[in-house]
Image (cartoon, rainbow, N blue to C red):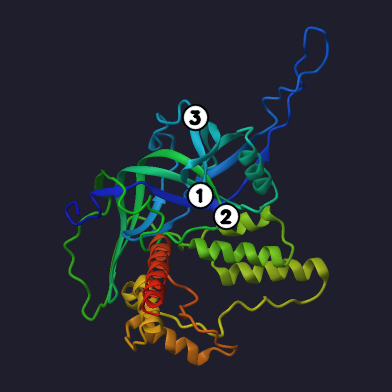
Amino acid sequence: MADQLGPDKLPQLRRVIPLELTAIPKAAPAKRDDGTDTNDDPDGDRFDMSFSSEAPVQRWFGDEILDHSASAIDLSRASRGMAYLVDHDTGDNVGLIESLRVEKNKLRGIVRFSRSQRAQDIKRDVQDGIRPFTSIGYRVNELVLEKETKDDDGTHRVYRVTNWTPMEGSTVAVPADTSVGAGRAAAGSEEFALKIRSAIPTTKEAPLPGARSEVRTMATSPVVLTPKDSAEILRLCDTHKVDRKRAIELIEKEGMTVDQASREILAEVAKRDGKTLQTPAAEKTDSLVLTDREQRQYNMCRGIMTHVRNIEENRHDTSFEMEVSEEISKKHEGRNHGGLFVPWRLNIDQQAARNAIERASSHCIAISASRWRMT
């Protein structure tokens, strides 16, 4: 930590926003010397896309706002174009991002797809809305602490990234939850030093008697809409046939929540169809709400491994995650097919969860092989 203000090193980070896609009109085909058209159309596979915005994102170190002023973005690495990847996989490059610039507090660029079959398949998925999100990988060069709130659950901070470098852009099908370490580059990746400072004026005023919280701030921070909330708003819009442009407006509206978006969507549908509709029920009948402290205690990897050991080794080990699963199973109204129940809204490191599943699969295979040798 740098003077206890926040992290003094960070890995390459990622953030996701709903796809905004504008096809660039095709240029007239070039002519050969004999007057016939060529098949070389350089503009046929180019699209104008947005890659990032100033929407706050929950990180493991606090809430992060990516400044989109011209002086905050270092475009030196993108001067010759930036890789356009599939799910941030550097081995799956399907295009090039050119002409990066800031428009209306968003970083936009022109994506030129490769003519390979793989790239053309991805292009069609992007056009058809199968891959409805874009993501940016970037390096943080400077952080400014803008707000700090202290309460019984600990210290909550809001940071503004005042200098950052775009590294690559990606098409993604599912938004990652960035609140507990997801949203970083691959585990074990290099971390980079950064500058960090505070914009909060120091004060020596004593707190009021009986006060249970302390807030130090320069400006009011908007309500943070998590990637999962954004996906839920998109689902509601798709269910009620609300166009994607309106969905993006709802997601980017300051202070918006899923409940508020749901009411606005239903109001629009009722006005359009002349009848009252109800929001489709989300999977909340089996839900269990964890406090912030319990969220930090919850470890998906530990829960998966404990569950696997209990099944394969006929054990009855317990853990906090197993207790949560048992509590949710009591509320479950459908058939129980086994497995580990998890809370509906859970801040989880998705990469770590995938690693745990892979380790669990390897563990099961090893046990099965051992039993086969014993028979």
The location of residue 80, given as percent across then percent down, is 47, 25
Relative side of 175 to 36, left or right: left
Among the two numbered marks 1 and 3 on one chain, the one whose residue lies closer to the N terminus: 3
Q: Nearer the viewer, mark 1 or mark 3?
A: 1
Residue that numbered label 2 is attached to: 173
Which residue is at 49% across, 88% downward? 329
The image quadrant that residue 300 belongs to is bottom left
The image quadrant that residue 358 belongs to is bottom left
Relative side of 311 to 42, left or right: left
**Label 3 crowd bin: few (<14), some (14–19), many (20+), radius 10 Å:** many
Report the quarter where the N terminus lies. Answer: bottom left
The location of residue 75, given as percent across then percent down, is 42, 32
Can residue 348 be seen here? The reply is no
Of the residues shown, which amino acid type is indicated by label 1?
Asp
Mark 1–mark 3 Cα distance, whole angstroms, equals 18 Å
Nearer to us in this view, 333 or 312: 312
Disc tally is 3
Of the residues shown, which amino acid type is indicated by label 2?
Ala
Nearer to us in this view, 271 or 171: 171
Residue that numbered label 1 is attached to: 87
Residue 60, compared with residue 100, is above or below; it is below
Which residue is at 36% across, 46% downward? 12
Among the two numbered marks 2 and 3 on one chain, the one whose residue lies closer to the N terminus: 3
The image quadrant that residue 118 belongs to is top right
Of the residues shown, which amino acid type is indicated by label 3?
Gly
Nearer to us in this view, 314 or 327: 314
Q: Please, which residue is most extreme toward the front here? A: 375
Residue 126, compared with residue 294, is above or below; it is above
In the picture, the disc for residue 81 is 3
The location of residue 297, given as percent across then percent down, is 31, 75
The location of residue 260, given as percent across then percent down, is 59, 69
